[in-house]
Image (tube, helix red, strand yellow):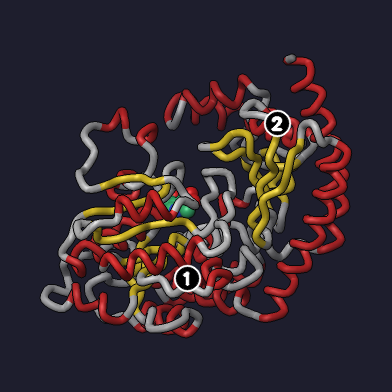
């Protein structure tokens, strides 16, 4: 059996020396070993962590969810990757179920393996359909690290990697005036996260999304909603965008669709947009996109996450977290300034940019895995598994209280 130290050395020598140096420096050189439900354990035992990050939604249903593991095992008894050129009963069934859970005529699904790939396809489809090339996105938003998704993101993630493809422009989130000024007849689509996570869980102001929809319609541009983190029940509704009475033209879903077990993503298209593939249905392909082994897992994820009881459990958890945060904020009001929350899509607004990383480290020391927002480090994200038990919430808050005390003291000591 590989020991913890062997794993770290091999990772350092063959995967990423930079990551090992980073985690060592902060005393966070944890190696993921056994995992189940909300917990992950350091390889070989010892430290455990309660997952309050869930990889942005991948582990919405916990680690190695036994129902999903059984579905994947059953898939392995009869399926393989499948053939991405042929007609597939598994992909058809999954696409049909996605269409049934999505409003309006969002009837078609193009499958990929990851969120970035699905964003790339959304942008390609929008460009092909409109015959335009411009893409507007939110400054500080995040859509992945693949080609077009990366181009829609912040410059810091692209700078070392050569020229930027033309046609991309970022505007501030929550600023319809800036969007209106940029939305001319060259714009194919506006792409937005429903709650920009990497920007610090910023909540849309009242009327923002309906104004975005109106401006897109007026300019003849399409609206792509990136639901990679907010979809599948995270916000207490099945789709995050449904809080805003919005019908997007394209929806991107990933992460949680995998059940944490088999990578899969999808770009959902309104019915007329599928015409972009009529002339040549093979113009876009993805060898592993919608691999048949993963389709039954994804269908089970949809079945679980769309249950009214499941969504009301998410809402109950969201209330318990809100109450817990209110109490914490009273105790640490200098350090902890406010909470951003839509269901279980949550961010803690802290004193300044040093505080997100400090709280992440202090939470780690208290057995909580929490990650600060990369494009707004004054905000620490909090994304618990959607199926955690309500009676685990007090344990989480006991730990969070200690983490917050240590983090506030540490910040004070820095002056
Ligand atoms: C909102 C959003 N969109 C897209 C992506 C890209 O997904 P992936 O890493 O699977 O390519 C991410 C990943 O974190 C994300 O948070």
Q: Is mark 1 within 8 Å of ligand 1?
A: no
315 left or right, relative to 64 = right
Q: Residue at x 18, y 60 (%)?
A: 132
Q: Nearer the viewer, mark 2 or mark 1?
A: 2
Give coordinates of residue 261: x percent, y percent.
53, 60
Give the mark nearer the N terminus: 2 vs 1: 1
Find residue 346 and name its label. Answer: none
- The image position of residue 375, as x and y in percent, is 51, 37
The residue tagged 1 is 76
Residue placed most toward the observer, 398 or 59: 398
* Residue at the farthest left position: 279
At 22% from the left and 73% from the top, the residue drawn is 85
User: x%, y% of residue 199?
Assistant: 52, 43
Residue 5: quarter of image:
top right
Q: Residue at x 27, y 47 (%)?
A: 168
Q: Residues within 10 Å of mark 1 (few under 14, many from 20)?
A: some
Q: Secondary structure at mark 2?
A: loop
In what element is the residue under mark 1? helix
Q: Up-down: is 168 above or below 375?
A: below
> x%, y% of residue 89?
36, 83
The residue located at (51%, 77%) in the rendering is: 299
Tell me the quadrant of the picture where the C terminus can be found.
top right
The foreground one among 223 and 265 is: 223
Q: Dividing the picture into quarters, in which one does residue 343 lie? A: bottom right
Quickly name the residue at label 2.
351
Total of numbered circles in the picture? 2
* Left or right: 187 as drawn, with respect to 370: left
């Amino acid at each position: 059996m590989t020991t913890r130290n062997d794993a770290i050395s091999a990772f350092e020598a063959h995967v990423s020396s930079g990551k090992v140096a980073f985690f060592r420096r902060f005393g966070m050189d944890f190696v993921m070993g056994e995992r189940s439900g909300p917990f992950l354990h350091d390889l070989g035992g010892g430290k455990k962590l309660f997952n309050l990050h869930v990889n942005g939604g991948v582990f919405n249903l916990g680690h190695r969810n036994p129902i999903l593991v059984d579905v994947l095992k059953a898939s392995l008894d009869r399926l393989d990757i499948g053939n991405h050129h042929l007609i597939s009963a598994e992909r058809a069934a999954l696409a049909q179920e996605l269409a049934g859970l999505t409003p309006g005529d969002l009837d078609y699904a193009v499958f990929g393996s990851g969120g970035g790939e699905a964003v790339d396809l959304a942008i390609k489809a929008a460009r092909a359909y409109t015959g335009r090339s411009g893409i507007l996105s939110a400054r500080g938003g995040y859509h992945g690290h693949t080609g077009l998704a990366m181009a829609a993101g912040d410059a810091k993630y692209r700078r070392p990697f050569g020229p930027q493809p033309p046609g991309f422009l970022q505007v501030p989130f929550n600023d319809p005036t800036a969007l209106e000024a940029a939305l001319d007849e060259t714009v194919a689509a506006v792409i937005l996260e429903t709650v920009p996570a990497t920007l610090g869980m910023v909540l849309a102001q009242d009327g923002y999304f309906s104004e975005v929809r109106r401006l897109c319609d007026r300019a003849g541009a399409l609206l792509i909603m990136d639901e990679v983190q907010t979809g599948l029940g995270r916000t207490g509704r099945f789709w995050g965008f449904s809080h805003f009475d919005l019908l997007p033209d394209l929806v991107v879903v990933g992460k949680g669709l995998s059940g944490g077990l088999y990578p899969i993503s999808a770009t959902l298209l309104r019915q007329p947009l599928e015409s972009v593939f009529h002339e040549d249905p093979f113009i876009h392909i993805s060898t592993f996109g919608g691999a048949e082994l993963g389709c039954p897992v994804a269908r089970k994820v949809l079945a679980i996450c769309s249950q009214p009881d499941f969504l009301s459990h998410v809402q109950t958890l969201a209330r318990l977290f809100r109450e817990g945060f209110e109490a914490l904020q009273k105790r640490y009001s200098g350090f902890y300034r406010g909470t951003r929350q839509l269901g279980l899509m949550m961010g803690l607004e802290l004193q300044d940019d040093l505080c997100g990383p400090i709280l992440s480290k202090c939470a780690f020391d208290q057995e909580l895995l929490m990650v600060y927002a990369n494009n707004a480090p004054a905000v620490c994200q909090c994304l618990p598994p959607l199926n955690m038990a309500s009676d685990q919430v007090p344990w989480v808050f006991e730990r969070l209280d200690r983490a917050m005390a240590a983090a506030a003291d540490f910040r004070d000591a820095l002056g």
